[in-house]
Image (tube, rainbow, N blue to C red):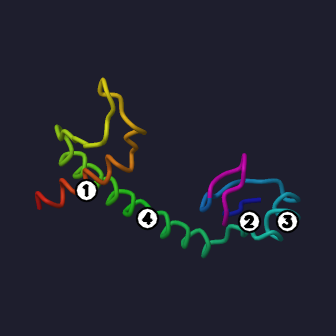
């Protein structure tokens, strides 16, 4: 039985995947719990449209990430914080500190 998954199912597939399952598993478990719907022509067409939209969205996100990586290439971030004798820091420099400093640097350049 072919079904289209409506949710991620462990060891079976992710949302939107078209999978072959045993008839009983599909009828008695997946469909009643709303995890899948039977694969019909209309459902398959809808899934293909959703997958095309998801692919376009992924491409846009990839392009944005590439542009950001190009902007950040070669950037040096200096975070000022308190230090004790011998240059030992009080606390730590976290990823949040680095992100805030990058945001400040990039917004001042624009």
Between marks 1 and 2, how big is the CA–CA gap? 41 Å
Residue 33's disc number: none
Task: Tell which tag, 3 or 1, sits nearer the viewer.
Answer: 1
Residue 58 at x, y percent in the picture = 39, 58
Q: Is residue 72 above or below residue 9?
A: above
Dot 1 or dot 2, earlier in sequence: 2
Dot 4 or dot 3, earlier in sequence: 3
Write down the quadrant of residue 14 in the picture.
Answer: bottom right
Task: Tell which tag, 3 or 2, sits nearer the viewer.
Answer: 2
Residue 32 at x, y percent in the picture = 83, 71
Point 11% across, 57% down: residue: 109
SS assignment at label 3: helix
Write down the quadrant of residue 92 in the picture.
Answer: top left
Q: Residue furthest left?
A: 109
Q: Residue furthest front?
A: 85
Q: Residues within 10 Å of mark 3 (few under 14, many from 20)?
A: some
Residue 35's disc number: 2
What residue range appears in magenta? 6-14
Q: Residues within 10 Å of mark 2 (few under 14, many from 20)?
A: some
Residue 16 at x, y percent in the picture = 60, 62
Task: Tell which tag, 4 or 2, sits nearer the viewer.
Answer: 2
Task: Tell which tag, 4 or 1, sits nearer the viewer.
Answer: 1
**Residue behind mark 3:** 27
Between marks 4 and 2, how big is the CA–CA gap? 22 Å
Between marks 3 and 1, how big is the CA–CA gap? 52 Å
Tell me whether the residue at label 4 lies in contact with that at label 3, contact meaning CB atoms closer than 8 angstroms.
Answer: no
Dot 4 or dot 1, earlier in sequence: 4
**Residue behind mark 4:** 52
**Residue behind mark 1:** 103
């Amino acid at each position: 039985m072919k079904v289209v998954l409506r949710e991620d199912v462990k060891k079976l597939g992710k949302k939107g995947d078209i999978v072959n399952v045993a008839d009983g598993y599909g009828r008695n478990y997946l469909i009643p719990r709303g995890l899948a719907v039977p694969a019909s022509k209309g459902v398959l067409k809808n899934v293909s449209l959703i997958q095309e939209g998801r692919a376009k969205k992924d491409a846009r996100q990839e392009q944005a990430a590439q542009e950001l990586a190009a902007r950040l290439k070669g950037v040096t971030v200096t975070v000022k914080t308190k230090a004790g004798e011998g240059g030992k820091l009080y606390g730590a420099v976290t990823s949040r500190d680095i992100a805030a400093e990058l945001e400040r640097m990039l917004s001042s350049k624009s």
